Image (cartoon, rainbow, N blue to C red):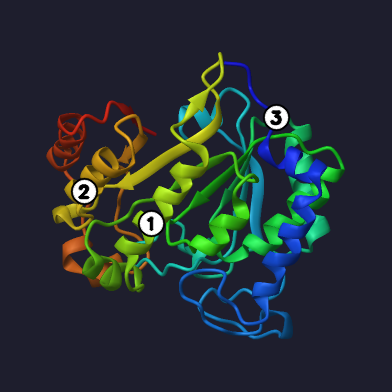
Amino acid sequence: MTAPAPAYLELLERGGLGRRVTAALSHLTSCDVCPLACGVDRTAGELGVCKTGEYAQVSSHFPHHGEERPISGRRGSGTIFFMRCNLRCVYCQNAEISQLSFGREVSGEELAAMMLALQARGCHNINLVSPTHVIPQILEAVYLAARDGLSLPLVYNTGGYDSLEMLALLEGVVDIYMPDMKYGDAEAARKYSLVKDYVRVNQAAVLAMHRQVGDLQVDAQGIAVRGLLVRHLVLPNGLAGSERVLRFLAEKVSKNSYVNIMAQYHPAFRAEDFSELNRRITAQEYQEAIQLARALGLTRLDKV
């Protein structure tokens, strides 16, 4: 298929993108940007769980060649790693970024300049990693960058604990949603990612994302242009609840869902404090997840 223009360009032309920015920024004064709804005034320097104030914090930005094939392609995905996260996974594989503040604060103009620089380097898309807690700042930067010529699809690369109200502000802005579905069991999410109701919130968010963009679509070169791509990390001892996650995707979202069932779990951050997490997964555990997905009718499976 021919790649369509990114969704946000039409919204910019109609004048709606600027209104989305204003609406999103208003949520910072009593923050409910994510389901944690800390209620702090981030514009006054108050910090909630994500430890992020009025401005987004960025760890790095570069062309990433290690994402899924439809995202990285040949020229790389223009990845912006945001610091901090609204999840606090005890086994986080990127804890130096998500938990330990390895990076710097940036203005909307600086964030927009990063997007334009990645476009100038030939990247296929702008890949926003851990964006949930900085949606207002991202919308502002996209608005500024789009006025200056940004024309790449946006990838919303999230842990999956997202607010439906914020996702509504992203409708017609984000082209490709790439959420994690980390758990099929709410108690596991509470214990290992320190959030309540992850499964309910996550499933509602994924349904909303799919309603907005549909199944993943790729161009003639196999590069994603629009749609949903779901990631599920297999944990040892069945702790991720893979069967429930995959069944939800097959039965409630779409059997045509593009799913990356990931095998790269290794004990990191605080995983050694939990004996049940303190080992890599086995080949059998991974193959069982793959076989289950296929048995449920999920055939668009990717591996990184």
Decide which of 216, 289 is in the foreground and name it. Answer: 216
For disc 3, the marked residue is 5
Q: Secondary structure at mark 3?
A: loop
Decide which of 163, 268 is in the foreground and name it. Answer: 163
Q: Secondary structure at mark 1?
A: helix
Of the residues shown, which amino acid type is indicated by label 3?
A: Ala
Mark 2 or mark 3, whichever is nearer to me = 3
Where residue 292 appears, as percent x and y from the top left, is 16, 36
Residue furthest right in the image: 148
Q: Is residue 57 visible to us here?
A: no
Task: Measure the alpha-carbon separation of dots 3 and 1.
Answer: 27 Å
Where residue 272 appears, as percent x and y from the top left, is 26, 67
Q: Is residue 146 above or below residue 84?
A: above
Instruction: Name which residue lies at 55% across and 75% down.
Output: 32
Tell me if 279 is positioned left or right of 206 in this view: left
Give the crowd class for mark 3: few <14, some 14-19, many >=20 residues within 10 Å.
few
Of the residues shown, which amino acid type is indicated by label 1?
A: Ala
Task: Measure the alpha-carbon separation of dots 2 and 1.
Answer: 17 Å
Q: Secondary structure at mark 2?
A: helix
Of the residues shown, which amino acid type is indicated by label 2?
A: Ser
Q: Is residue 165 visible to us here?
A: yes
- What number is the disc on residue 204? 1
Whichever of labels 3 and 1 marks the residue nearer the N terminus, that label is 3
Tell me if 118 is positioned left or right of 222 in this view: right
Mark 2 or mark 1, whichever is nearer to me = 1
Tell me if 178 is positioned left or right of 52 in this view: left
For disc 2, the marked residue is 242
- What number is the disc on residue 123? none
Instruction: Name which residue lies at 15% across and 43% down.
Output: 285
Task: Measure the alpha-carbon separation of dots 2 and 3.
Answer: 35 Å
